[in-house]
Image (cartoon, rainbow, N blue to C red):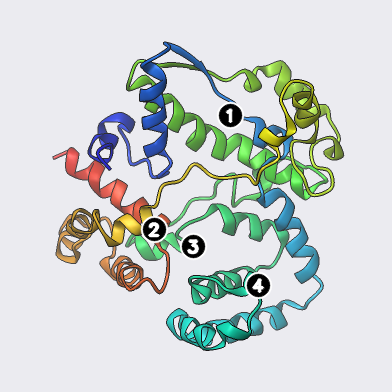
Amino acid sequence: MDVIPSLVAIYDEPFADSSQIPTCLVSRLARSQVTVSLSGDGGDELFGGYNRYFWARNLWRKLGWMPRPLRAALAGVLTTLPPAAWDTAFRKLERWLPARLRYATPGDKLHKAAEILAVRSSEEIYLGLVSHWKTPVQLVPGSVEPLTLLTDPGQQADLPDFEHRMMYLDTVTYLPDDILTKVDRAAMAVSLETRVPLLDHRVVEFAWSLPLDMKIRRGQGKWLLRQVLYRHVPQSLMERPKMGFGVPIDQWLRGPLKAWAAALIEPARLLREGFFDPAPIQCKWIEHQAATRNWSYYLWDVLMFQAWLEAQK
């Protein structure tokens, strides 16, 4: 948490991927030993490593056959009860539920599932997965969201595989605008040089020449990279569930970061500054504080903008 006050200076823009915090710490730790480091960034996008590449396709196969009105009706049923009411119902039934259905916040998860049920296509599943605020025009008064590569099919590459389309979009949006930016600025803030060998143009060209089954096979991503690595590294070090590089922002916003965050999104302040409508932000803040929903990603977006704006004064 000591890193958070310096994020605005490090990133010099409203950058809101909270894994920036551990990235800053790891960069600082690496710089104590070396001046140049190697990064594995690009491997997931080029060789099919993200979990969404597997389950987005599987989810659409299971749901796509259902008429959309039926899926929308089911979504409506799931959202009839607020998350807190679902949580209460699940607690009462917990003793009869199998362990795999015992979630800390089942109501939150059911409401997220309802968002996916209402989609029109597999592409909408992907867009929902990579979006935080689903209706940004409600958040920013008087705004109109422009068409982007993510929302305009006319700008996208014509690729036959849904998995390859997701990998392509990640490669030209998420990778440069989030991942590479995050690492580069965190590293340069401590004078650490980073190199990204997997993004050598020859590796990128080779990866895109491969068929999908050389990347994703039997529900596992980065298949080809794994075969190479098996020659050099014990499998026991590699065969583990994929984990993000996250920190418990959701808990911090209810605890040690609560006062800092509340001051930045105070309704009168938001109205005075004129960039955001306070209503949807306060709604998510209240639900997050009550632990009925986890809105940490949404709130972190606004908080990083507000922290950046404050630094401009």
Q: Residue at x 52, y 55 (%)?
A: 131
Residue assigned mark 2: 296
**198 left or right of 179?**
right
Crowding at dot 1, Cα within 10 Å, few <14 / some 14-19 / many 20+, comes out as: some
What whole-number distance in Å separates the C-alpha atoms at marks 3 and 2? 14 Å
| Above or below for 255 versus 207 | below
Locate the C terminus by quadrant: top left
Q: Secondary structure at mark 4?
A: helix
Q: Nearer the viewer, residue 138 or 25?
A: 25
Q: Nearer the viewer, residue 262 or 219?
A: 219
Crowding at dot 4, Cα within 10 Å, few <14 / some 14-19 / many 20+, comes out as: many
Q: Are marks 1 and 4 in contact (CB under 8 Å)?
A: no
Q: Nearer the viewer, residue 257 or 133?
A: 257
Where does the image place residue 291, in percent across and percent down from the top left?
A: 37, 71
Res 106 label: none
What whole-number distance in Å separates the C-alpha atoms at marks 2 and 4? 22 Å
Residue assigned mark 1: 41
Q: Secondary structure at mark 2?
A: helix
Q: Residue at x 84, y 35 (%)?
A: 214
Which of the two discs, 2 and 4, sits closer to the camera? 2
Where does the image place residue 42, in percent across and percent down from the top left?
A: 62, 30
What whole-number distance in Å separates the C-alpha atoms at marks 4 and 3? 15 Å
